[in-house]
Structures are given as C-alpha cells and as structure tokens.
Image (spheres, grey):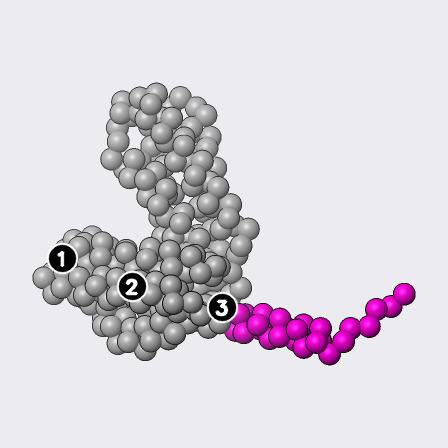
C-alpha cells in the first residue's frame, strides 16, 4: 500500500535537501580557495628548499613569496569565511589557525630578508600542516591534505636513508623503520584511492602528466623499500628509503603555479 506524505514531511525533506546543498556549496568553496592558495603557496615552499648558493633558485623563491604575499589577504578572507562554519567553536578555530598562518608567513618573510631560505622553508612547512588540521577537524576532504599526511612518515624514511649508515641499522632501528614504512604505505594507499579530479584541481596537461608520473614513481619506490625490508642488505634498504622523496616532491609540486 502506498503511503501519502503530508506537507509537514515534504517541508522537512526540502529543508534537509537545502541543508545538504548548502553544505556541499560550502565544501566546494573551501576546496576552491584551498586550491587557489596552494597554487601560490607550493612554489614558495618548494623554491625555498633549493640548495644554498643557488642564486637563480633564490631569485625565484623571492618572486614566489611575493606572489603568495600579494594573494594571501584575499585568500585569507575567503578561507576565514569558508572555514568558520556555523558554530562559534569552528569560527574560533578558523581564526586561530589563520593567525598561525599569518605568523608563519611573517617568519618566512623575515628569514628570506636575512638570506636564510632554509629557515623560510621551515616556517612555510607549518602552513600546510596547520590548514590540514583545520580542514580535517571540519570534515573537509581535500586531496592535498592526504599528501601532507603522507609527508611526515615519508620524511622520516628519507632522512634515515640519507643520514644513516648500514651499520646503524640495528634490529631495533630496522623494526622502527618497518613501522614507519607501514604507516607511510597505509597513508599512500589512501592517496591512491582518493585521486583528485584534474578539472576541479585546475591541473594543466603538463601538471597532470607530472602528477601521474610522480604517483607511479612513489608507488614503485615504496614497493622497492618493501622488498628491501624483507632482505638483509642494509645499504639497499637505506637507498630505497631515500628514493621515496624525489618523486613525492614532483607529485606535490604538480599543484603549484610557477609562472
């Protein structure tokens, strides 16, 4: 037997539909403005990580920082509106996080003015981490945050690969490395299973090609590290650990606008 729904139910259903539409619209706005910020933030972040003494890279880093500074006020205002939500606690969290970003950018400017791009890079690292935490707390699924989450264990592995000697890999250290690998592998699977829409993320054909190649190379590097962890050649293990970072950097920087 069919069931008739009265006007009150229909009004309630319409209200739910409107709320979902508004939520979707708010999520889309957060994504759009986060993508726009990363387009200018990523070049500043990556170019400040160039080797000391590279004058060409230093000049590009200054130009990238100037672009970020020029676009930050408008993007900040938009993100504050987008991420403030409906609850006072959400608004307070958004204000706190964006103030932290302000501070990080100020520290980066100060370091660059002093010719210390390494310190500027360290300050800029906090930006993506702080914004990831805020978006995550508000239930925003932003692809770049998945890359940022993977970055932490990846960096631990790469640092070990670049600084440790084969004799440093004691049984305890190998066990620690295996644990870090497991964490990185799980986070990378999350990346692979939630790939971004190139149109939404405004990737050009060249950026998409760079991204695809970087993804494939990271997956291959993790597979090689897995094989090395099952073996007994410590030198091969360290080489495999160090090899994860370069393709990850190419994957991440595919979302930057460098011109």
The one nearer the camera, 242 or 22, is 22
Q: Tag 1 or tag 3, which sits nearer the N-term?
A: 3
Q: Is residue 11 left or right of residue 151?
A: right
- Residue 164: percent from the left, percent from the top? 26, 31
- Residue 39: percent from the left, percent from the top? 37, 68
Screen quadrant of the N terminus: bottom right
Label 1: few (<14), some (14–19) or many (≥20) C-alpha neighbours in 10 Å: some
Range covered by the magenta-colored residues: 1-25
- Residue pointed to by mark 3: 27
Q: Main secondary structure of the magenta part?
A: helix
Q: CA distance from mark 3 to mark 1?
A: 37 Å
- Indicate which label's residue lies in the foreground, 1 or 2: 2
The one nearer the camera, 255 or 179, is 179
Q: Tag 2 or tag 1, which sits nearer the N-term?
A: 2
Question: Disc 3, disc 2: CB below 8 Å?
Answer: no
Residue 33 in view (yes/no)? no
Name the mark on residue 240. none
Q: What's the residue at 58%, 70% (across, down)?
A: 20
- Residue pointed to by mark 2: 96
- Residue pointed to by mark 1: 116
Q: CA distance from mark 3 to mark 2?
A: 20 Å
Task: Tell me where residue 169 sits by quadrant.
Answer: top left
């Amino acid at each position: 037997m069919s069931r008739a729904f009265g006007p009150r139910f229909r009004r309630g259903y319409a209200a739910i539909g409107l709320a979902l539409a508004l939520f979707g619209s708010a999520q889309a706005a957060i994504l759009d403005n986060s993508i726009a910020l990363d387009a200018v933030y990523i070049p500043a972040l990556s170019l400040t990580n160039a080797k000391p003494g590279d004058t060409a890279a230093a000049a590009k880093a200054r130009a990238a920082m100037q672009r970020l500074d020029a676009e930050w006020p408008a993007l900040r205002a938009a993100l504050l509106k987008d991420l403030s939500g409906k609850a006072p606690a959400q608004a307070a969290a958004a204000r706190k996080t964006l103030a932290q970003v302000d501070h990080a950018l100020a520290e980066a400017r100060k370091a660059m003015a002093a010719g210390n791009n390494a310190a500027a890079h360290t300050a800029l690292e906090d930006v993506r981490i702080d914004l990831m935490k805020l978006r995550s707390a508000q239930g925003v699924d932003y692809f770049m945050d998945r890359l940022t989450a993977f970055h932490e264990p990846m960096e631990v592995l790469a640092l070990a690969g670049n600084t440790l000697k084969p004799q440093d890999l004691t049984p305890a250290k190998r066990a620690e490395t295996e644990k870090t690998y497991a964490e990185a592998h799980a986070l990378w699977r999350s990346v692979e299973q939630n790939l971004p829409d190139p149109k939404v993320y405004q990737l050009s054909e060249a950026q998409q090609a760079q991204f695809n190649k970087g993804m494939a190379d990271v997956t291959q590097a993790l597979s090689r590290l897995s094989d090395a962890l099952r073996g007994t050649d410590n030198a091969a293990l360290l080489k495999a650990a160090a090899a994860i970072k370069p393709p990850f950097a190419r994957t991440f920087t595919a979302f930057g606008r460098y011109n």
